[in-house]
Image (spheres, grey):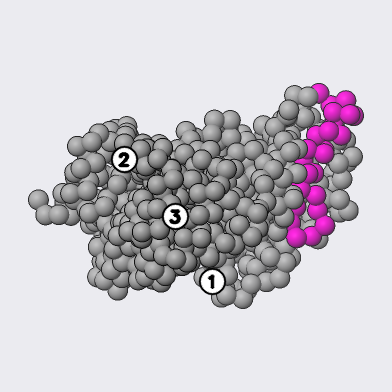
Amino acid sequence: MPMYIDPHIHLVSRTTDDYEAMHKAGIVATIEPAFWLGQPRTEVGSFKDYFSTLVGWERFRASQFGIVHYCTMGLNSKEANNIPLAEQVMELLPLYVGKEGVVAIGEIGYDDQTEAEDRFYREQLELAKEVDLPVLIHTPHRDKKRGTTRSMDVAEEHGMDPGWIIVDHNNEETVKEVLDRGYWAGFTIYPHTKMGSERMVEIVKQYGPERIIVNSAADWGISDPLAVPKTADLMRKMGIPEEHVQMVTYKNALTAFSLSGQMHEDDWLKAPPIDQTKKMSGNSVLRGGQVPRVEGPSDRVEN
Amino acid sequence: MNPKSELLAFLKEIIQKEADEKSMNWLDEKSQKIQDSGSKNAFYLAFSQASRFFSKDKLLLNPETKIKANALIDGFQPEFWNVLQTARAYLLLHFSLEKEEWLKAINQLFETGDLYEQQALYASLNLMPFSEEMLPRAIEGCRTNMTLVFDAIALNNPYAPSHFPELNWNQMVLKAVFMQRPLYRIQQLDQRRNPALAEIASDFAHERWAAGRNVMPELWRLVSPFINEKFMGDLEKVMSSEDLLEKKGGALALHHSDFAPAKELLKKYPEFIHGIEKGAISWEEIGQEYQETRV
């Protein structure tokens, strides 16, 4: 069965049904970029607990379903506009960027392309350089084309290597420039907006599989955590060679994010030697009397 | 050598056996820097980045090393530690500040720690300089649902038995039962049994039976010294079980009871008496078999 990586998915918003379905569909690893929660946070402590969840509970939860969970750390562009809060978040970030399984600084970039967004985007590019991590760029939904170009211009101003940057949420209008300038191009398959699977197939046909990465960006909105395997299936049906399908739904994401030194294929291919603790990893996402339907750790725990 | 340098030398020795030269150089350099600068950030960063240099492979210790560990810190069982957490404990012991500052810094680390950092922190509570003050943190830690973190506090760790008040101790043991953790790995379990815990354990068994589910045989270890008229009903039920392992647990609980009807009941099972006397039936053996076959 083919393996997939979903390199952009906000799992804190997803249910255990999703995790089960993802595992069944062949998703072996996921990357959860730090983002906003649908409404702006008002306290720095909310960021702290969110970041801790990304490296703690969510990682544990994913492991219970046989999925390896990585994350990116950063201050998103929307919340960068609350400057006093953003400054406190910037002080918090150094605590998290060096942690195990943190594979990039992100998602950062522009939303409304304000001055504050620009300031914190630049500060975080510097942080990424300092700690040798790739960058995941969120491109704006509005004024997308210019916002995308600007994101790349500013990254280059800061001396970033395009090969270390994943520019996400591309569409037909932005992809050419992103690829031409040497960046990785992420595509988010959303059911109603952005990219649909059919459009994705056309893009891979036109541009080939090099440096193209498909993701679901599934979150608390209408979105599909199976977008990556579904798109792969459609690509196969539409005659895209298997090797190309694997590149855009698995291998490219691995190559790009493993620049961090924090992501290795062995993490899922060769599970670490089973010790007593690991073997007994409690399945505390199951409640009393439920029998786990997933492979792997098999004890069950009431909450 | 003072006790701290002795402990540091010991930790270094057991890490060294499992790590390469490059990683040891990194550890030397960082621990020196943390010690000289007293910088929180240097400590936090090294504590996180240790995962880039040390594996999560279990330490392999010979019997002499295990004895030495216990002589250094009562109840210290690094044979249940991995290399990474040992390296993290080593870094932690180089971070010294005035009490209030130290507590603030360590609490921040607990609150922002990832899964494995939390494991390292909770497992080394007894090695910490102000370990008495860590009691609220340890109690809070038991509220986790991450097995790895819970185990770091509850299993093979001398902190809870030597610090937890009875209420918190009982909550921890009950949660271990709930999470089906191996009770035989909880230190001083026998010494800290108490009548309230026996009541709670019995109630728990009744709930499980009501739901048509089995009861972990190790649970009867908690009830054993307090067996009375009331608990006899439970043990009679256990002894009528179809499950051999459950019956072994019941038999062992009866065996260690001074209550005359318990002795009477056990007499009906000479094969268990024989097994217990030969040492073939023990809490550890029952716990291990349960973990291997039922969990």
Mark 3, other Cα within 10 Å: few <14 / some 14–19 / many ≥20:
many
The C terminus of chain B - image quarter: top right
Q: Identify which amino acid the numbered label 3 is placed on.
A: Trp
Check disc 1 and report the residue beneath it: A45
- CB under 8 Å between discs 3 and 2: no
Question: Range of the magenta residues?
Answer: A214-241
Nearest to the observer: residue B225 or residue A173: B225
In this view, the mark in front (3 or 1): 3
How far apart are the two marked residues, 3 and 2, measured between alpha carbons?
Answer: 18 Å
* Residue at 29% across, 47% down: B77
> Do the residues marked 3 and 2 share a common chain?
yes
Q: Give left or right: position of B142 versus A135.
A: left
Q: Is residue A152 visible?
A: no
How far apart are the two marked residues, 2 and 1, measured between alpha carbons?
Answer: 57 Å
Label 1 sits on a secondary structure element that is helix
Mark 1, other Cα within 10 Å: few <14 / some 14–19 / many ≥20:
few
Check disc 2 and report the residue beneath it: B277
